[in-house]
Image: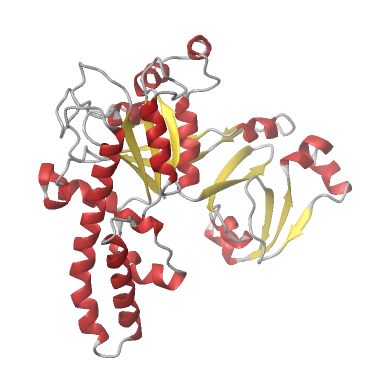
Amino acid sequence: MEAGIVGLPNVGKSTLFNALTASKAAQSENYPFCTIEPNEGIVSVPDARLTRITHFITPQKTIPAILKLVDIAGIVKGASEGEGLGNKFLSHIRQVDAIVQVVRCFEDPDVIHVAGTVDPIADMDTIETELMLADIQTLENALSKAERTARSGDKEAKLRVAVIQKCNEHLSKDEPLRTLELNSLEQSAVSSYGLMSAKPVLYVANVSENDLEGKDPLVQKVRDQAAKVGATVVCVCAKLESELAELEEPDRSEMLAEVGLAEPALHQIARATYDTLGLESYFTAGEKEVRAWTIPKGATAPQGAGVIHSDFERGFIRCEVYTLEDLETYKTEKEIRQAGKLRVEGKSYIMQDGDICHFLFNV
C-alpha cells in the first residue's frame, strides 16, 4: 500500500516529502515541473505503544510499521488534457492507493503561487476537477469495450457497463467517486481502471511558522471542505519540519519545546496517512524484537499471520492474543496466561488494532 503526495506547484509538497523521508527530492525554485519522475520514500509510523510494550518486554531491537510515499510532480489546471505533462503525472496518481494533498495556507511573496493568489479551496477544487475529468475519460474509453462484450451475454461485462454508467452519472454531478457507495462486486468490476477520484484523500494544510495550530481562516476553509468528503486535515509547517528533520536529538526536542509542539507534525501526517490507507497494526513481542506489523482493517487472523510469512497463513492453526492493557496490568506474558487473559482465536477472528500476538502454524 502506498500514498501519493500531490499538490499544485509551490505549495511545499517536495519540502514536506523531503522532511518525511529525509531524502533530497528536487526543490521547485518557483519552477512548476521540477519533479518529472515521482520520488519514492519509506516512512516509519510513530507508535507510542511500541515504547509501552518495551517497558515490560526488553528486545534486541524495536521495529515500527512503515508506509511508502510517492512524491508526484505538481499538477496544474488542464492536467487531464495534458497540460504541464499532466497525463504523465496523473498516471502516477493512478498507481497509488491514497492521495495526500498538500494545500498552501500561507502567504509568502518570495514563493510565487502558480495561480497568482493563495486560495486553498480553489487549489483543492483544481486537483479534484482534474482527477474527475481524467476518470470521465477513462470510463468513456472503457464503456464501449464493455458494451461490446456485454452484447455477447457476458454477465461480468453487463455488470461493468452498469457500474461505469453509475460512476459517470455521479461524476456528471461534479461529485468525486469516493463519495459514491459501491458494493464489493461493483468495486471489483471497475477496480482495474485505477479511478483517481475514488481514492481516499488526506489534506495537509501547509501553514506558516506563526500559525502552527492552524487557526488561520484559510485553514478552517480547508477543514470545512474536507468534511464534505469525510477527509481528515493535518496542519504542518513544511519549512519548520524540514529544519527539524535535519536536527539530531536533543536539539530537535529543544526546538520542538521552543515552538510549543509535543512532537513533529510529520508524525501526525504519517499516522493519518496510515489510517487513510485503511491500515492498522498488530504487534509481536519477544526478546529478539518487538515489532509492529501492518494489516488492512478487517483482516482475519490467518491474513494477519500471512504478513509475517506466507507459510504462517497457509498452515495457520490458531492465534494467541493479549492486549497492551493486559501487559501493563500483569507485567509479563506468564502472568497474563495465568490470569486467563491470553485469548486463543481461530481462523475467523478479525484482528484488532493493537493486538499482541503469537501465531501457531504447521505446513
Question: Total label count?
Answer: 0
Task: Please state if 149 lies on the left or on the right of 286 as rendered.
Answer: left
Asked whether residue 21 appears in the rendered view, the answer is no
Residue nearest the viewer, comparing 8 with 96: 8
* Whole-percent x, y for residue 276 in the image: 46, 46
Q: Which colour scheme is used?
A: secondary structure
Vertical position of residue 167 compared to residue 43: above or below: below
Q: Quadrant of residue 332?
A: top right
Location of the C terminus (image quadrant): bottom right
At x 83% / y 44%, what residue is drawn? 336
Q: Quadrant of residue 56?
A: top right
* Whole-percent x, y for residue 325 in the image: 76, 39
Residue lying furthest bottom: 153
At x 44% / y 25%, what residue is drawn? 214
Task: Please state if 201 lies on the left or on the right of 251 as rendered.
Answer: left
Residue nearest the viewer, comparing 358 with 185: 185
Asked whether residue 341 appears in the rendered view, the answer is yes
* Whole-percent x, y for residue 68 in the image: 39, 42
At x 60% / y 40%, what residue is drawn? 291
